[in-house]
Amino acid sequence: MGEPLFDRVALIGIGLIGSSLARALKARGLAGHVAVSSRTRETLERAAELKLGDSYHQDAGEAVRGADFVVICAPVGAFAAIAEQIGPHLEAGSILSDVGSVKQAVIRDVMPHLPEGVHFVPGHPVAGTEHSGPEAGFADLFRGRWCILTPSPAVALDAVAKVRAFWEGAGSKVDCMDARHHDKVLAITSHLPHMIAYTIVGTAADLEASDRAEVIKYSAGGFRDFTRIAASDPVMWRDIFLNNREAVLEALGRFTEDLTALQRAIRRGEAEALEDHFTRTRDIRRGVIDAKQD
Ligand code: NAP
């Protein structure tokens, strides 16, 4: 391993994503020092037991002091308060990034708190599991997965290049795009599927107790796969839907129209329309497998 990419990296939040980053940073020698910060003492103690960092701070402002790279790894609803807290302590010339699942709201909430001379390169690793907390992370979470960066055109190119090198070091492939486009694409590929899973599992939960028992007993018929997605962290997903409202509502509108069309095809007995639709969707699955994103 050569010189680390950064001297001191501060991770603000050490749940699934923060702890996976901490592990990747260690495994790949990307940081000289990893400062870990979490809101509660319990999580911080757990992170210390797991030896995720080199120093531990309940005060996020203290964690970022002297850091040349800071990554916010908390639910997006907490970003404004975190940015307000760390803003005065960020070093001129340092790079700030994040892993939030929405990007326009994050930029809106963070930018007003940044001092002159801090380079803000927002990011979103498109990788995850339904588990939370510092125990849930693993160094290879990002391997072969995309990380999307959404820097404003005004951000220094060498800061963007460093963040790109960081994610590539963690095993990711990196794309850059406009934050608005990111939110629109992710509304379809991630936010809508989660909304559908939360709905189906909620519908089953509302069934009579006897029917509900059978839904669980025979869940291998398809329901099981939705329960995995619907087990994702409630606070994280509350924040995602509230902070990507416009794009999620647009995606939901399209979905509802398509669902109504399929409903009509079933009612009218339109076998060909159903078969055509299912054939088209099977091709999408093949595309996902070919792109090694299954
Ligand atoms: P997580 O496992 O639930 O961990 C959340 C971390 O943020 C914990 O350290 C927690 O601290 C801290 N935190 C929670 N609420 C906070 C608040 N109000 N103020 C300050 N800190 C707070 O979450 P995660 O799954 O790693 O997700 C973190 C971020 O990654 C989110 O923005 C999410 O959108 C994004 N993301 C998640 C996934 C995924 O699959 N999970 C994938 C891509 C991106 P305490 O435990 O001490 O309270």
Image (cartoon, helix red, strand yellow):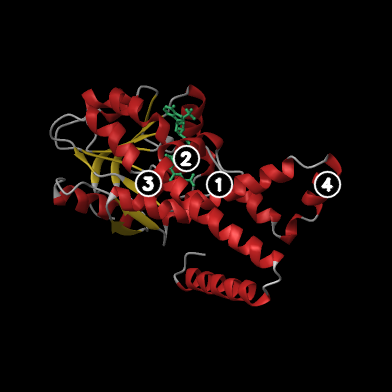
Q: Are marks 3 and 1 in contact (CB under 8 Å)?
A: no
Q: Amino acid at mark 1?
A: Met
273 or 209, which is in the foreground? 273
Which amino acid type corresponds to the residue marked 3 in the rendered image? Answer: Lys
Quarter the N terminus occupies: bottom left
Residue furthest front as drawn: 268
Residue 70: give x, y in percent of width and height.
Answer: 28, 37
Q: Crowdedness of circle 1 by 10 Å Cα count: few (<14), some, many (20+)?
A: some
The residue pinned by badge 3 equals 26
Determine whether the residue tagged by mark 2 lies in a helix, strand or loop: helix
Q: Which mark is residue 211?
A: 4
Foreground: disc 3 or disc 1: 1
Q: Which residue is mark 1?
A: 195
Q: Earlier in the sequence, mark 2 or mark 1?
A: 1
Label number found at residue 241: 2
Ligand 1 within 8 Å of disc 2? The answer is: no
